[in-house]
Image (cartoon, rainbow, N blue to C red):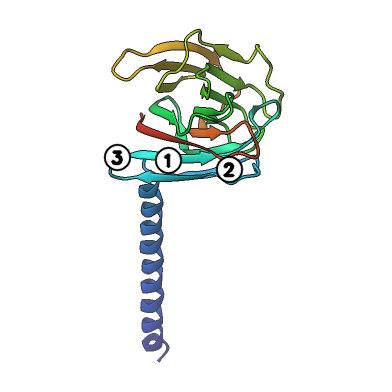
């Protein structure tokens, strides 16, 4: 009697388990598809204005918006669109702010971070609103970033293409114009950056009361 009644119950459990697995798989696929090569996005450091991202599957471009006081000192505020990464990588994309009236210190670019903590170790390939091109980093979690010890300025400005690369513990930034060879901004060794980290695109308004917007396209993450 118990054997006869247990089989329908077992079948129901198996069916429910299969449905949960199928739903979870479809959900993960939908989340991945909605962000292209990335898997997540969020505001880092709780900026006053919430950021957002919209991925266009036709043009493979990202419309990204974000606020934040800065990515500097011992904590950061910005919108981050990212995925987990392990080991070496090369991340390349085209970046453009939308609107010409923003803060000259607003920032877009690539950043590798140990985590989504506001004071995380990071290395960032940055383009500013005024065209300033610079590589910046925080070597220790929660440490104050130092000027000019923890940044490399490039003498030229206003590049569309930004690349960030990791080879072992070395982080390299390159920039260029569309269709032209990339130029090396500089490199820095990050001994405390874990092998398992986060890589993604970001935007920071450098003004907590303002929500900046940008478009990012031709994104390659190898």
C-alpha separation, residue under disc 3 versus residue under disc 1: 11 Å
Residue drawn 58% across and 19% down? 136
Q: What residue would you read off at disc 1? A: 63
Q: Which residue is mark 2?
A: 43
What percent of the width, then of the height, locates residue 121? 62, 28
Q: Nearer the viewer, residue 166 or 129?
A: 129
Label located before the other in sequence (3 or 2): 2
Cα separation, mark 3 vs mark 2, equals: 24 Å
Locate the N terminus by quadrant: bottom left
Q: Which label sits on residue 76?
A: none
Q: Nearer the viewer, mark 3 or mark 2?
A: 3
In the figure, is residue 104 to the left or right of 12? Answer: right
Q: Disc 2 to disc 1, how far (Cα)?
A: 15 Å
Q: Which residue is mark 3?
A: 59
Disc 1 is placed on an element classified as: strand
Tell which of 86 and 53 is nearer to you. 53
Element marked by disc 3: loop
């Amino acid at each position: 009697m118990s054997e006869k009644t247990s089989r329908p119950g077992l079948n129901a459990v198996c069916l429910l388990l299969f449905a949960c697995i199928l739903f979870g798989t479809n959900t993960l696929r939908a989340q991945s598809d909605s962000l292209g090569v990335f898997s997540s996005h969020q505001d880092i450091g709780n900026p006053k204005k919430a950021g957002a991202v919209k991925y266009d599957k036709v043009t493979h471009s990202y419309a990204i918006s974000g606020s934040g006081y800065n990515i500097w000192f011992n904590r950061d505020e910005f919108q981050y669109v990212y995925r987990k990464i392990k080991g070496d990588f090369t991340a390349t994309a085209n970046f453009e702010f939308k609107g010409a009236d923003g803060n000259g210190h607003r920032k877009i670019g690539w950043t590798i971070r140990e985590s989504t903590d506001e004071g995380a170790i990071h290395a960032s390939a940055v383009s500013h609103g005024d065209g300033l091109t610079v590589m910046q980093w925080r070597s220790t979690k929660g440490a104050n970033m130092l000027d000019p010890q923890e940044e490399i300025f490039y003498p030229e400005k206003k590049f569309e293409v930004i690349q960030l690369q990791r080879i072992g513990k070395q982080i390299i930034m390159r920039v260029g114009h569309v269709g032209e060879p990339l130029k090396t901004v500089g490199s820095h060794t990050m001994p405390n950056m874990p092998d398992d980290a986060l890589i993604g695109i970001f935007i920071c308004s450098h003004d907590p009361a303002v929500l900046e917007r940008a478009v990012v396209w031709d994104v390659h993450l190898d």
